Amino acid sequence: MNPRKEVIIRDVATVKHEPSACGRILPLSSADDFKEVNLAIAEINTPTIPHFHKERTEFYFVLDGEGKLIAGLKTSHKIKKGVLVIIPPNTVHYTIPRIPLKVMTISTPAWTKEDEHIIHNISEIEWIKLDYSDFREKYELISEFLSREGIDFKEGISKEEEEMLDIERQSLVLRIGLNKMSIAELRKFMSLAH
């Protein structure tokens, strides 16, 4: 353990969200504070990116919402408020929210960007097996709508601009309720909005 000589007090209102494979993360502590463990809050409004960590174990405690956690690219677990999930190292995982999720995450050792390994080579057949294709279509429909509204990501924007754009996009999705619509409702909405 790295010894601390002072108490750390951090007000959640002073912490900035960061994008990650696990959604929008509010890092309440980091490896700079304590190398052995860290605490963050993840806000998950859309399916997260399949990824794994070689070094760390993650503890997810669901504070709000519900959905599925896919682990090992084959096992689907229903998660909802009050559920704890422990994800060991080298386990590919991602989350599909049905109702936007707020998850407290504890990582040991503390999370680092270098230990977030994204999976890019999942075939179309594997997505279908994983029950992900419907969610991917929903994501694509919402992305198409946001693009029509002129709030899509452009190459060369700064991290700050990307963060602000991400907040604007999520706000619009939540305000209209696109995240709660079925695929059929989204298709109808898209044809009316066209």
Image (tube, rainbow, N blue to C red):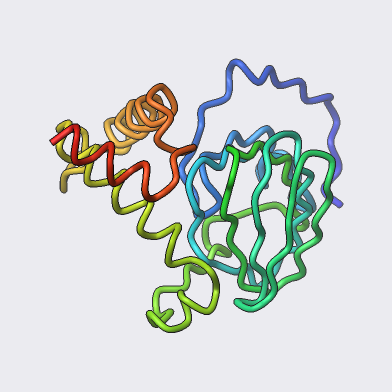
The quarter in which the C terminus is drawn is top left
Q: Is residue 88 visible?
A: yes
Q: Residue at x 53, y 79 (%)?
A: 129
Vertical order, 115 against 102 (above or below): below
Q: Based on the displayed image, in which of its 4 quarters is residue 158 positioned?
A: top left
The front one of 34 and 145 is: 145
The front one of 11 and 177 is: 177
| x and y percentages locating residue 111 in the rendered image | 65, 53
Q: Based on the displayed image, in which of its 4 quarters is residue 38 positioned?
A: top right
Q: Residue at x 28, y 46 (%)?
A: 187
| x and y percentages locating residue 186 in the rendered image | 34, 43
Q: How many numbered circles are shown?
A: 0
Q: Residue at x 83, y 26 (%)?
A: 6
Q: Is residue 90 visible?
A: no
Q: Based on the displayed image, in which of its 4 quarters is residue 145 positioned?
A: top left
Q: Along the horizontal axis of the image, is 41 left or right of 14?
A: right
Q: Residue at x 53, y 69 (%)?
A: 131
The front one of 10 and 149 is: 149
| x and y percentages locating residue 51 in the rendered image | 54, 67
Vertical order, 141 against 41 (above or below): below
Vertical order, 174 against 74 (above or below): above
Vertical order, 4 against 111 (above or below): above
Q: Along the horizontal axis of the image, is 90 left or right of 176?
A: right
